[in-house]
């Protein structure tokens, strides 16, 4: 049995934390022993413990990638736990400590900052010294780097990471349970949505990078055309006051601020269309959750979005920041239920083929197996050399 020790620096439950929880819930524990190192007081702690997974709390890694003291503390943990593989999530300290302990390292790259209109990294990232520094860090400190979207892998290639180090594994989730007709009626009533209303939802942190401004400006254009389209904004964040103020300035009467929603099924279950107007994504989990419930999306062509939403197949893409194109797409789909139904059917099918949790877990397990096989081969060679020396 191989022992895998995950290290994550998140104190809240964000995208990386959710993905880790999915992986931990689905991994074959007859084949892999897993444990997680995380910051003291992390909100992930009770969720991991519910899965029956061992947790180890430590100082110095809370919401930051590198800390000198954390390297020493992590190395001590590794020496005590004796894992075969350390799997890091935005934790440079852990990669350094693992290399010092001569352990195999898997690193998941959870973020990317490349838009579809700028598929290639800026020139300065592809030359000295940036490329050489980043490339050296990735190549030396990791045996395998998991890219969660093709654009993330492309980004790494252009900034010096060796091709053989990077492996593509799409983010995966457990599909959400559909809601009943009774639940749907209750949720529509809760949010004040009429039976004839076309419902758009946006589930995202209320931060600038998520592009709520462009969704609101599209909503203003839609409002001029019809009053039978409603927009639900689910989430909280530092930009909430500014977003609410902009909605007021635009005179929007079709916006519903839902705040933090514990069970996103109540929003996705009544949505006809999900919106993602983000400036930066790898593989957006909210999009995946929507696809699992058969909800197509209108998404910006930012980062990994085009690899989740295939234009005209399981949703529509619009150029980043082009709120007029977003408004046009919303109105077109509202007036074409047959097309919307076709997109909805393919949304669920593509989710099952590509983004279901079992698909992701199987690929990560295969990465672990290959690294463990390499360890066994090395140990066999060492034993042969020792035997030869004895002779």
Image (tube, helix red, strand yellow):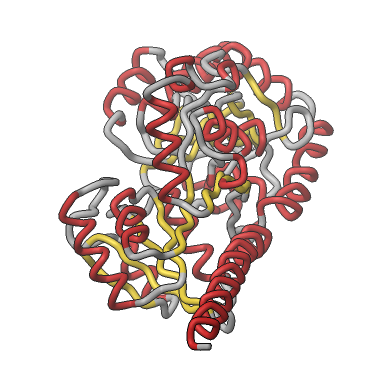
Query: In the rendered image of this protein, does residue 132 appear above or below residue 39?
Result: above
5 lies above or below 297? below
Judge by depth and name the residue closer to the eye, 27 or 330: 27
Residue 158 picture quarter: top right
Instruction: Give the left or right position of residue 97, taking residue 315 as reference.
Output: left
Rendered residue at 61%/45% (across/down): 164
Placement of 218 over or under 293, stated as above or below:
above
Residue found 79% across the figure and 26% down from its top: 336
Percent position (x, y) of residue 280?
48, 29
Whether residue 186 is visible, yes or no, is: yes
Q: Seen in the image, is 104 located left or right of residue 66?
A: right
Taking the spot 53% from the left edge, 85% from the top edge, the residue there is: 387
Q: Quadrant of residue 250?
A: top left
Expressed as whole percent of the image width and height from the top left, the position of residue 349 reads: 78, 50
In front of the other: 289 or 96: 96
Count how many numbered circles sit on residues in the image.
Answer: 0
Residue 225, compared with residue 313, is above or below; it is above
Residue nearest the viewer, comparing 183 with 86: 86
Name the residue located 44 percent from the left edge and 76 percent from the top edge. 51
Q: Indicate the quadrant where residue 1 lies.
A: bottom right
Q: Position of residue 107 (x, y in %)?
A: 46, 52
| Identity of the residue furthest to the front in this view | 391
Left or right position of 150 against 64: right
């Amino acid at each position: 049995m191989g022992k895998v020790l995950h290290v994550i620096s998140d104190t809240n439950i964000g995208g990386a934390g959710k993905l880790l929880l999915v992986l931990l819930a689905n991994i074959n524990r007859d084949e892999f022993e897993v444990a997680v190192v995380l910051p003291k007081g992390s909100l992930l702690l009770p969720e991991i413990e519910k899965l029956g997974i061992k947790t180890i709390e430590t100082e110095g890694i809370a919401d930051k990638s590198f800390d000198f003291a954390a390297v020493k503390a992590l190395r001590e943990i590794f020496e005590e736990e004796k894992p075969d593989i350390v799997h890091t999530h935005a934790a440079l300290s852990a990669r350094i400590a693992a290399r010092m302990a001569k352990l195999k390292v898997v690193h998941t790259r959870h973020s990317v900052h490349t838009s579809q209109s700028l598929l290639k990294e800026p020139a300065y990232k592809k030359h000295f010294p940036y490329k050489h520094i980043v490339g050296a860090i990735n190549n030396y400190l990791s045996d395998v780097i998991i890219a969660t979207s093709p654009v993330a892998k492309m980004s790494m290639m252009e900034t010096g990471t060796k091709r053989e180090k990077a492996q593509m594994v799409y983010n995966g989730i457990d599909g959400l349970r559909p809601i009943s007709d009774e639940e749907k009626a209750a949720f529509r009533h809760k949010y004040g949505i009429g039976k004839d209303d076309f419902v758009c939802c946006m589930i995202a942190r209320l931060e600038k990078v998520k592009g709520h401004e462009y969704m609101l400006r599209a909503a203003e254009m839609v409002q001029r055309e019809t009053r039978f389209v409603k927009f639900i904004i689910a989430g909280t964040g530092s930009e909430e006051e500014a977003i609410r103020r902009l909605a007021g300035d635009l005179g929007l009467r079709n916006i519903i601020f839902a705040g933090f929603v514990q069970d996103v099924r109540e929003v996705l279950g009544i949505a006809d269309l999900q919106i993602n107007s983000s400036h930066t994504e790898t593989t957006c989990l909210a999009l995946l959750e929507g696809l699992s419930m058969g909800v197509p999306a209108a998404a910006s062509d930012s980062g990994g979005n085009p690899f989740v939403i295939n234009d005209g197949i399981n949703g529509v893409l619009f150029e980043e920041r082009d709120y007029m194109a977003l408004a046009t797409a919303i109105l077109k789909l509202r007036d074409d239920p047959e097309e919307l139904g076709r997109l909805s059917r393919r949304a669920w099918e593509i989710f099952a083929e590509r983004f279901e949790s079992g698909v992701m877990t199987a690929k990560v397990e295969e990465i672990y197996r290959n690294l463990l096989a390499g360890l066994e081969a090395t140990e066999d060679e060492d034993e042969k050399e020792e035997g030869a020396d004895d002779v």
